[in-house]
């Protein structure tokens, strides 16, 4: 090829050299275009923000948060004490009345003497000494204190069957039935009616 170029004329050689240079340049451009076109290949991945997040999620799976766990007390330290439920104050007062000794009296001229509630079919009963006054049922109010006596009877006097009790100002004595007592023979009024119940020492 070079020998043939040597035998050609100057003008011919110049034309041939230009043609070869053009072919070489065209081939180089073609190679660069092929490289540039590779990025447009639909099979090539595009790593945008969404695609990167998806790839990261596949590689690092999300782990659900662990449920809260109870913290054990440190060694040598006591655990937190359990909180006791609130007590019913009325039930507590009724229990004190039912389980305690207290002082009571029937007839205003007598002294306060030791009394105690006794179980009865209706719940609790009470007996007043001296007058031999017995009431089969003691009814408590919302505060847990005696409010009414039912089924009352006396050995030697006629008394109301139901006696309502009223609390004193100092909150220490409950009393009632200050009228309506009579002698059984002639029905005349009895001079000194009434009942008094003093609060147990635990309620003072």
Image: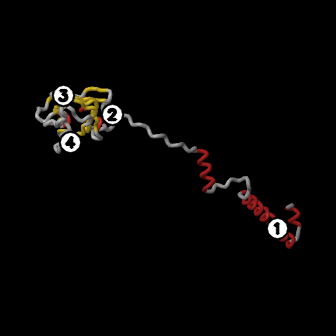
Mark 4 closeness class: few <14, some 14–19, many ≥20 residues within 10 Å:
some
Asked if residue 35 lies left or right of residue 114, the reply is right
In the image, residue 155 sits, relative to residue 146, either above or below, namely above
How far apart, in angstroms, are the residues tagged by discs 4 and 1?
Answer: 134 Å
Question: What is the spatial separation of the Cα atoms under label 2 and label 3, in whole angstroms?
Answer: 64 Å
Mark with earlier residue (2, 4): 2
Estimate the spatial distance between the alpha carbons at disc 3 and disc 1, rounded to whole Å.
156 Å
| Cα–Cα gap, marks 3 and 4 | 27 Å
Q: Residue shown at 59%/47% (left/top)?
A: 57
User: For numbered disc 1, what is the local secondary structure?
Assistant: helix
- Counting residues from the start of the chain, the first of labels 1 and 2 encountered is 1
Residue visible at 73% across and 57% down?
Answer: 38
* Secondary structure under the numbered disc 4 in the rendered image: strand
The answer to whether residue 30 shows anywhere in this view is yes
Residue 140 image position (x, y, % from top left): 28, 37
Q: Residues within 10 Å of mark 1 (few under 14, many from 20)?
A: few
Q: Mark 1 or mark 2: which is in front?
A: 2
Mark 2 residue crowding within 10 angstroms, few (<14) / some (14–19) / many (20+): few
Which residue is the site of mark 4? 167
What mark, if any, has residue 76 been given in the picture?
none
In depth, the one of 54 and 98 nearer the eye is 98
Marks 4 & 1, CB-CB < 8 Å contact? no
- Horizontal side of 72 relative to 15 (left or right) equals left
Q: Which residue is mark 2?
A: 79
Quarter of the picture containing the C terminus is top left
- The location of residue 65, given as percent across then percent down, is 50, 43
- Which residue is tagged 1? 17
Q: Name the N-terminal-most of marks 2 and 3.
A: 2
SS under mark 3: loop
Question: Are discs 2 and 4 less than 8 Å apart at CB?
Answer: no
Location of mark 3 (residue): 156
Residue mark closest to the camera, 3 vs 1: 3
């Amino acid at each position: 090829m070079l020998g043939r170029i040597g035998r050609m004329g100057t003008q011919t050689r110049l034309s041939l050299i230009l043609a070869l240079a053009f072919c070489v340049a065209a081939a180089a451009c073609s190679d660069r275009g092929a490289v540039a076109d590779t990025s447009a290949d639909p099979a090539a991945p595009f790593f945008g923000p969404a695609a990167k997040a998806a790839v990261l999620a596949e590689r690092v799976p999300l782990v659900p948060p662990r449920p809260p766990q109870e913290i054990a007390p440190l060694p040598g330290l006591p655990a937190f004490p359990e909180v006791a439920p609130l007590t019913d104050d009325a039930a507590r007062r009724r229990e004190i009345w039912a389980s305690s000794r207290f002082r009571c009296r029937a007839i205003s001229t007598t002294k306060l003497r030791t009394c105690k509630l006794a179980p009865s079919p209706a719940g609790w009963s009470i007996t007043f000494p001296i007058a031999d006054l017995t009431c089969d049922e003691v009814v408590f109010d919302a505060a847990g204190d005696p409010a009414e006596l039912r089924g009352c009877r006396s050995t030697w006097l006629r008394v109301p069957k139901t006696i309502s009790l009223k609390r004193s100002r100092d909150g220490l004595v409950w009393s009632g039935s200050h009228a309506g007592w009579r002698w059984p023979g002639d029905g005349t009024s009895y001079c000194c009616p009434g009942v008094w119940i003093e609060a147990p020492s635990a309620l003072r």
